[in-house]
Image: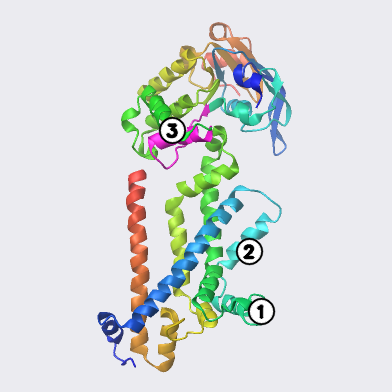
Amino acid sequence: MYDNSPWAAFELIARMDPALISIVALSLKVSLSAVAIATLIGLPIGAAVALWRFPGRSLLIVILNAFMGLPPVVVGLAVYLLLSRAGPLGKYGLLFTPTAMIIAQFVLVLPIIAALARQVIEDLWQEYREQLGSLGVTRRRAIPTLLWDARFSLLTVVLAGFGRASAEVGAVLIVGGNIDGITRVMTTAIALETNKGNLALAMGLGVILLSLVALINAAAYLISETSRRRLG
Amino acid sequence: MNQSLSLSSLLPLELEQVSFSHRGQTLLHAIDLRLGPRGKTIVMGPNGAGKSLLMRLCHGLLQPTSGTIRWAGKPQASRQEIRRRQAMVFQRPIMLRRSVLANVCYALAVHGVSWRQRNALAMQALEHMGLAALAQRPARVLSGGEQQRLALARAWALRPDILFLDEPTSALDPAATKAVEDAIEEFHRAGTRIVMSTHDLGQARRLADEVVFMCGGRLLEQTPAERFFEAPASLEAAAFVRGELIW
């Protein structure tokens, strides 16, 4: 059992405690996978909504924007119902697995990436529209062009999605179940330690989570800033 | 693809009773215009005369509200094919967030040039516009004059039949303006039809074979350059040439 001193979490880190390492690794695996899939699907959706006019477009934009604020517990509950034995996807037996957690975080992150990408791409399209039209670029051909040219702004969009995924606890708690060694991640571990009264340990874990998120953001920022400065 | 169209020139370009309205306001009134196969046409007129609008309609970026636009005697049949044989240079050049060379290569790729040939053709165009040394630089850190030359290089690589230029030098200093005008002469020598708008009278005198004068959304005259500057037919054009305010 963990002892309840403020440095306990860091002692675990220093000792490379296998339980802690697996929690950190699972956290990263779940959140990064969810964000990667949401990026692959969300960026083209955002670009398509930005470029095409179709009936119901305004409604779709409002829905995407509203879903940026989806409560994680509600998403957790919905995915839980979907994956539970009696649910429509129950036969795959995904509930209480890391896959279920990835699905739940994907649902949380997708609207954020699609809605913010829509705004970024629409602004860039306004700027490029005449020039691309003059070159004879079709809208479909314009999508990869715009995604590539907006890459620095879109990196920030993806980071916003990652922030959401790594910080939430409600969804992964419900669909993962916080099972030790199987579905326990940083946020659910923090919630658990807090409930047990191990406040210092919970705080230590929190600092580790924060440092990881900061580290990933710093790396992304450095990469984008240096290339942005190079490309003007 | 239309074989006869792809072999012969796109020109002449004919506009018949072309009008353009936006939000209930008629911005161009029943324009009749014929642009022959050769030469440099300068579109002149005060701000708001409809010069940019006219060129965007000719280029196909906008569709006329009424009237017809015909290339080589045919109504706009294969728009894609017609588009690919024109180019336009805008007042404010828009550069992709890539290298100078990649900007030209992109235009070639869109026009279906295979990737093996792109680099060589793009470098040729850059050399032509004196930009070869800047090929690997990011396009958006170039100066305004260099960016406009890059826009011209991009157009050059596409070997258009007709090149539209919408006040391409209005934001440039005299040296950069000179470079753009030299480039326009190069296009002309290579057989590209030039259609350019400007409100710089000196520039119009230097370049024009023919002047199209517009005011208030109407085409007031289309006159050989010499006659236009000596004895313009319309009162508005006469006042414009004298440097008076008209509206």
Asked if badge 1 and badge 3 are on a common chain, one would say no
Residue A23 point in image, percent of width and height: 39, 79
Amino acid type, mark 3: Arg
- Residue named by callout 1: A87
The boundaries of the magenta stretch are B88-111
Assess disc 1: are there few (<14), some (14-19) or many (≥20) residues with their C-alpha within 10 Å of its C-alpha: few
Residue B238 point in image, percent of width and height: 58, 12
Q: Is residue A62 visible?
A: yes
Amino acid type, mark 2: Ile
Mark whose residue sits in front, 1 or 2: 1
Residue B97 point in image, percent of width and height: 42, 42
User: Looking at the rendering, which quadrant does residue A230 occupy?
Assistant: top left
Pick whichever, B51 or A214, lies toward us.
A214
Asked if badge 1 and badge 2 are on a common chain, one would say yes
The residue under the point 65% across, 18% down is B4
Q: Is residue A148 above or below residue A199?
A: above
In 3D space, how far apart are the residues under numbered discs 3 and 2 (Cα atoms)? 45 Å
- Residue named by callout 3: B116
The residue under the point 40% across, 89% down is A193
Determine whether the residue tagged by mark 3 lies in a helix, strand or loop: helix
Q: Is residue B244 above or below residue A64?
A: above
Q: Is residue A78 visible?
A: no
Image check: B25 left or right of A21?
right
In 3D space, how far apart are the residues under numbered discs 1 and 2 (Cα atoms)? 25 Å
